[in-house]
Amino acid sequence: MTPNDPVVGIGIAILVLLLLLGVFRRLRGPSDEARESKQAHEAARERDPPVEIGETYEFGVTELTDHHSGSEVAVGKVEGFVVFTEDVPSDLAKGDVIRAKVLSFNEGRTSADATFVTKA
């Protein structure tokens, strides 16, 4: 292969194109989803939580996820405020409506931890 070989030229063109694409993605910044998530987080930090410690609230389960403790938790929202609920029954599913008692807030007061009370 020589520098004038068409295969070498195509290879170089593809390499340059991939390099430019990488630079463009980096300059473009975070995705729309990442920006929206950050904006929602910042808005949550600027308002008082719509829940109180010790009170019970009813809400729909939007997802089930693994908690850092290793157990499964239900995630839901009360007036747009995220509530992580522990001690959920094994038959709980996304879309179920539950009642949970708020136990604490996270450090930034942008979400709360709760314990399962009952299915609604």
Image (cartoon, rainbow, N blue to C red):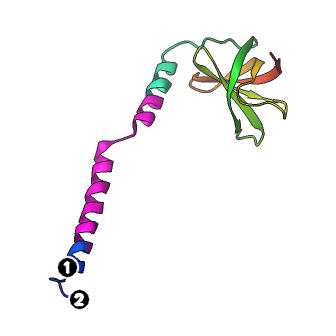
Q: Position of residue 81 (x, y in %)?
A: 59, 19
**110 or 59, which lies in front?**
59
- Within 10 Å of the Cα at label 1, are there few (<14), some (14-19), or many (20+) other Cα atoms? few
Q: Is residue 56 magenta?
A: no
The residue lying at 23 percent from left, 88 percent from top is 1
In this image, 97 relative to 76: left or right?
A: right
Instruction: Look at the image and tell me in which quarter the C terminus lies.
Output: top right
- Label placed on residue 26: none
- Label placed on residue 1: 2
Q: Position of residue 40 (x, y in %)?
A: 48, 24
- Please tell me in which quadrant of the rendered image residue 91 appears: top right
In this image, 55 relative to 27: left or right?
A: right
- Within 10 Å of the Cα at label 2, are there few (<14), some (14-19), or many (20+) other Cα atoms? few
The residue lying at 73 percent from left, 14 percent from top is 58
Most distant residue in the left direction: 4
- Please tell me in which quadrant of the rendered image residue 92 appears: top right
Q: Which residues are magenta?
A: 11-38
- Label placed on residue 6: 1
The residue lying at 76 percent from left, 37 percent from top is 72
